[in-house]
Image (cartoon, helix red, strand yellow):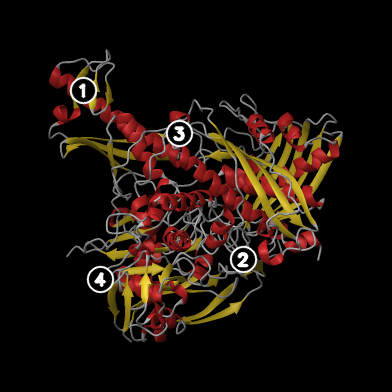
Amino acid sequence: MTRPAPARSPQEPADTVTGGIGTSPLRPDGTLKVRGEFAYSSDLWHEDMLWGATLRSPHPHARIVRLDVSRALAQPGVHAVLTHEDVPGENLYGLKYQDTPALAEDRVRYQGEPVAILAADHPEIARQALKHIVVEYEVLEPVTDPERAAHDETLPKLHPGGNLVRYQRIVKGDPETKADVVVSGVYEIGMQDQAFLGPESGLAVPDDDGGVDLYLATQWLHVDQKQTARALGLPPEKVRLTLSGVGGAFGGREDLSMQIHSCLLALRTGRPVKMVYNREESFFGHVHRHPAKMYYEHGATREGDLVYVRARLYFDGGAYASKTPVVVGNGTTLSVGPYNVPNAKIEGWGVYSNNPTCGAMRGLGAVQPTYAYESQMDKLAAALGMDPADLRIRNAMSEGSTNVTGQLVDFPAPVAELIQRLKDMPLPPERGEDADIRDLPGGASNVTHGEGVVRGVGYGVTIKNISYAEGLDDYSTARVRLQVLGGEPVAMVHTAAAEVGQGLVTLQQQIARTELGVPRVTVHPADTSVGDAGSSSASRQTYVTGGAVRNACRAVADAVYSLAERRLGRSATGMSLAGGKIVAADGEVVASLVDLLGEEIVEETREFHHRKTYPLDPETGQGDAHVQYGFSAHRAVVDVDVELGLVKVVQLDCAQDVGKAMNPDAVIGQIQGGSAQGLGLAVMEEIQVVDGKVRNPSFTDYLIPTVLDMPPMRIAVLERPDPHAPYGVRGVGEPPTISSTPAVANAIRAATGLELPRVPIRPEHITGT
Amino acid sequence: MRVNVIVNGEPRQADNVWEGESLLYVLRERLGLAGSKNACEQGECGSCTVYLDGVPACACLVAAGQAEGREVRTVEGLADGEQLDPIQESFVECGAVQCGFCTPGLLVTAHDLVARTEKPSDAEIREALAGNLCRCTGYEKILDAVRLAAARKEHA
């Protein structure tokens, strides 16, 4: 018997909204979401399902001496308890390196590492049963200092190859050259969490063919499928994944969490198994943003032209590699920012430690250096006696510039214009004596009624690579079908691209409507029955999946023209589709799609590959590593209570170039949301890790910005089309997260005159207590 | 134990409820009303906000037994059949929904604010929504949606 799909999944988005590219149609999933009917992965339900749970290591570093599950298995209501011995395939997975055990074998390398899993009738029975699994640990000294992990050979080796994941050097011009004015600093950035609201969850349903269907929230169905199938010892076609509702991602769903575990339990018990992490487990169940320590030196002429940048960057990857190699690649290649720098020496280290594993998060690898180099730019401006915005404009990269790896910027790069736009925006009015107390730092309960409150203004500018880099063929696939349904032409778009909240489903419809000239477009649920779409990350989906949908639509259109040529004897040359009609080159309507197609179904599948990139030279770091860049700039205005150390961001303005605003409202939504995450990193968001242990795994103690923390924003969206990209688009999602952090930090420095070499900036950093 | 609750106007019954279960679990897993969301289960994020006897509460903090005999109104009970409540319409129109996981809780909170406050000021809206976390939108479009719903109510 083939089991039915779980209740409440997949979704059927409304196909009644209209609008092509460049407009802002309503989200097709909006109505379902406001009615509470949209099925997120944690909402899935199956008649005879069991609940899975995970036993995790309490130690950041330990040897497993004994593991006994027999008592847990004997608990009433428990159906299976599994350890690494029950993993039929390879017990190692990973996005870049296969170094992460699905279930720990003889050693655990971080607090929270999965050791055993079980399935039971009720989630509470499952949680209680975990306590009956016996694990004896020999606790080992944890490796926690990334700088030492990079250089100190005497530390314990966490992996066979040692503790270095990747080292990358970039040398440009004469890095030993001298300059008139030199500033240096050491900057640290704490561990940020994606804090998506929808917990890791999914439902695995075993099938009679020995395979399994997994309904889940993820960012990349095919990479999950590949890794899960390998662990299960099954061919990929027997591990079928369907995207369920995703409650935010921000990079945190790129690595596996419950995928292998839920499938193992489903295959062992022969019953559907649902796994849902609670918030505490979620903090242990996904990778975080790499904390970093960065040494920077900038040299400039007296007139303010950058002469050189020298930097050493340490990224703490935690227990397993995840995206650490990419963080080192992005971090070093983007390390001087959107500025012209003739001479540079940059070194980046990504290391293993016994801290929580770090991987993808919005702004991958660019967030850390941007905070550092933008702090340096302000320091340099002060040393030169220049306006910080003017110094940035003077050094801004533009089309025709060559970046630090020697790559020519052969597309618009309006960096100076972005900064100028912000400079030209009016500042908010000075705080009056009669200010609403709720608008002061600390809000109604904490303020000193305005005495001791000082204001500051700061800028932050960034450059972020779009799509995967360094030679990866980072493509997407789309299947588009055109047919007559209910007497009208309907297009159906099918991709495996994950809608994680960003609006990709809307965009796929917009492209199909534009290309095929039909108002009705449905989007098939994303699953692995269509080709790979790559990840919903790196600001790449509009570019790459957008390109694939465009290509498939154009192939469908060509097939329709050929049909018209065959059936009607008209030359297909110059034909186009509009308003459900086929129009000849001279503007004459050739036929309606309804008449031409009849019962015929036209379906085409196409891939989109962006232009080729190349690996970096291992010695010099030179190479054409990136496809495209996104640019954004922020200006923050803050009030700081210097007595209490409290900060209120009064205004946060943003200017960003998006190439082409495919959906202007969605673009604004990305900028506002991204800016909030960057603000959070500046003043509140940090997973606090002491001796490898997480101290604040809850929303009580890990703070993300509320509506009271986010100030009003003015936004300037520039559209300077990239000639190499479909429709001229430029990835949008990440840049606003990156540049808002230094803007806020620089504004706090401007207000207080303090060095503040670490984010998030805490009250004690301001008060010095 | 058995728990009787009036949910969205209908008497509902859940059997074999374990004593530690929350109202949120009963709604989601026993009554099939998964609209209220399970984001933190600590009362910090507001994603599970429901009306309990007409007052917004985090369903994750209410023990199932505490809800015995009481009236619960969830996000599923905001619309009048096919007709969305004005606050729901405003959220869709203003782009206040991205991933949407926070949306059900925010809708209940905002619905309550608009119902009890004439022309809420920005400060009042921010204060009312401060217990509902959103990770996607940066809140600006949510503020727009509440302003729009309040204005429509005023002119209705």
Q: Which residue is mark 1?
A: A562
Q: Amino acid at mark 4?
A: Glu
On the question of residue A10 being in view, the answer is: yes
On the question of residue A82 being in view, the answer is: no
Which of discs 4 and 2 lies nearer the camera? The answer is: 4
Q: Is residue A350 above or below residue B21?
A: above
Q: Amino acid at mark 1?
A: Ser
Which of discs 4 and 3 lies nearer the camera? The answer is: 4
Residue lying at 34% horizontally and 63% vertically, measured from the top left: B76
Q: Which mark is residue A354?
A: 2
Residue lying at 61% horizontally and 46% vertically, measured from the top left: A738
Give the crowd class for mark 1: few <14, some 14-19, many >=20 residues within 10 Å.
some
Which of discs 2 and 1 lies nearer the camera? The answer is: 1
Give the crowd class for mark 3: few <14, some 14-19, many >=20 residues within 10 Å.
many
Residue lying at 41% horizontally and 87% vertically, measured from the top left: A71
Q: Which mark is residue A66?
A: none
x then y, percent, for residue A595: 14, 28
x then y, percent, for residue A603: 23, 35
Q: Amino acid at mark 2?
A: Asn
Q: Is residue A233 above or below residue B17?
A: above
x then y, percent, for residue A472: 48, 40
Q: Which mark is residue A47?
A: 4
Kindly report the distance in space between the C-alpha atoms of the residues bearing marks 2 and 1: 61 Å
Q: Earlier in the sequence, mark 3 or mark 2?
A: 2
Q: Pinpoint the chain carrying mark 4.
A: A
Give the crowd class for mark 4: few <14, some 14-19, many >=20 residues within 10 Å.
few
**Quadrant of image for the C terminus of chain A:** bottom right
Q: Which residue is mark 3?
A: A610
Q: Earlier in the sequence, mark 2 or mark 1?
A: 2
Q: Is residue B85 left or right of residue A743?
A: left
Q: How many marks?
A: 4
Q: Is residue B29 above or below residue A12?
A: below
